[in-house]
Image (cartoon, rainbow, N blue to C red):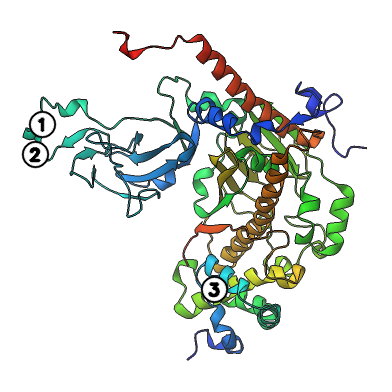
Amino acid sequence: MPHFPKPDTSWTEHFHLGTAPVSYEDSITPAHYERERDAIFRRTWLNVGRVEQLPRNGSYFTREIEVAGTSVVIVRDQAGEVRAFYNMCRHRGNKLVWNDFPGEETSGVCRQFACKYHGWRYSTSGELTFVQQEDEFFDLDKADYGLVPVRVDVWEGFIFVNLDANGTTPVREYLGRLGEGLEGYPFDKMTEVYKYRAVVGSNWKLFIDAFAEFYHAPVLHAKQAVADESRKLQSVGYEALFYDIDGPHGMVSSWGGMSPPKDLNMVKPIEQVLRSGLFGPWEAPDIGIEQLPSGLNPARHKAWGEDSFLFFPNFMVLVWKPNWYLTYHYWPTSYNTHVFEGGLYFVPPTNARERLQQELTAVTFKEYSLQDGNTLEATQRMLESRVITEFPLGDQEVLLRHLHRVAREYVDSYEQERSKTPVSISAAS
Amino acid sequence: MSTLPSEFADLEPFAAWEIPTQNGRYAMRLSSSMDELQAFYDAAFPRLDAALAYLDQFEFGALGEEAKRLLWLCSSLVTVSFPVEVWRQARVPDSGASAFDCVLEPAV
């Protein structure tokens, strides 16, 4: 007997995703991963940060996008516009912006970019402005040697890049109805940031799987709660309030009885004293809006606690009822490894008590994630054995079914496109 | 030498837990025995309410050195609360050798 209503007979059938067991070959095949790099990561909008990371004209940061085999520098130019460029000097290809370690990301503020190798300089809007010993070069017109731009777009303060130079869809359109439903949320007020990073021994989609369903939560995380509460959570299980899918993106809406809990005995002593926990500080800060954007709490349920949005391919935003949000990014590094990044964003605390409440939430998130990340390695190992090749997914795993289908469709349609395009032979002329 | 406000002199034996970063506090937890974690928790947890009341007197941006250290100590209490209150081991169960590093946190 479901606790919350479903459309039709199930969410899975409602979204026409089929109910058959699912293959995970897409997560264990090196050749498939190589196709995903071109078909997905070199062609979709990727979130690389937020505008708060570029507070001033000349502020910049770099991103190593290993899955696309490149590095990008994102900068607020002297006119205040956010721009992105391949992080590469036009002279002999040296990486332009880096600090001590060529493979590591960096950030800072500058008037211009200067190459460490031969001193070529570029304005923050990408023009080549200085060539060392320029008269030694042959017919060199500096106007022809600006930094190579990367498409960049900003949505609600989130900065996205797209490595497909031929694409024309703006990010707002790409994010579709689910993105639109979040517009107006005061992300810009939540500038107290904690970031975490983990190297995970699994395919990137497996970690999204883990965070796109909460079916696992009462079981895998049983030891995180006080014993009575843990037993109760497991006997009830998990049901979402609502699921939604639009294009390649999806969302799940959840109840959240822990902020504050109905009964103090449901939570640990430290949570009782600090009045905070995994779901955030119990007393929400003022964020200056009368009403949440329409895309939040889509079921309009009074027990609503949190919404998780998955923006394909690798960006999640989780908005919590007590006025804070989380971001997840999954950056593939091989078919069976990826780097996971988690960010927690709070309204800045006004006193030490609020600071400790946020600290408790952040540290709790870390403890849960340690369990999640480690379990993924266990899954990846066994999937690769191929002893079992098809897996039944339940209705609370509808977003997983959708994710893997979408990822496969991107690869298939890219392959089809390529097979139609005649191969050009450069020597023919 | 005292590091904490004089009202919290009883916590001076645990001054080693006045650690400014999350990674530092976590490393200290992993390198401590359950008995050590329990001893710190038993001393500090009953004082948490008083510490919060003390810290409430100040604007967040204007914490003095002693108040800051008290806040770091309370943050360490948060870090050790998990093993003491539920797991009875320093690492979260089923996390093996996995690591999850804090790469950015607001400074106090």
Tell me the chain of label 2: A
Amino acid on which the number 2 mark rests in the picture: Gln
In the rendered image, the residue lying farthest to the left is A135
Residue A4 as seen in the image, left or right of residue A47: right
Q: Is residue B73 visible?
A: yes
| In the image, residue A386 above or below residue A200 | above
Element type at mark 2: loop
Q: Quadrant of the C terminus of chain A?
A: top left
Residue A401 as seen in the image, left or right of residue A247: right
Which disc number belongs to residue A137? 1
In the rendered image, the residue lying farthest to the bottom is B1
Kindly identify the residue that appears in the image at 63 percent across and 44 percent down.
A202
Dot 3, crowdedness within 10 Å: few (<14), some or many (≥20)? many
Dot 1, crowdedness within 10 Å: few (<14), some or many (≥20)? few
What residue is pinned by disc 2? A133
Q: Nearer the viewer, residue A311 or B35?
A: B35
In the image, are marks 2 and 3 on the same chain? no
Kindly identify the residue that appears in the image at 23 percent across and 38 percent down.
A123
What residue is pinned by disc 3? B72
Element type at mark 1: loop
Residue B63 lies, in percent from the top left, at 47, 73
Amino acid on which the number 3 mark rests in the picture: Trp
Kindly identify the residue that appears in the image at 59 percent across and 47 percent down.
A326
| In the image, residue A194 above or below residue B2 | above
Tell me the chain of label 1: A
Residue B102 lies, in percent from the top left, at 53, 59
| In the image, residue A65 above or below residue A249 | below
Quarter of the figure with residue A405: top right
Residue A162 lies, in percent from the top left, at 45, 29
Tell me the chain of label 3: B
Q: Nearer the viewer, residue A427 or B31?
A: A427
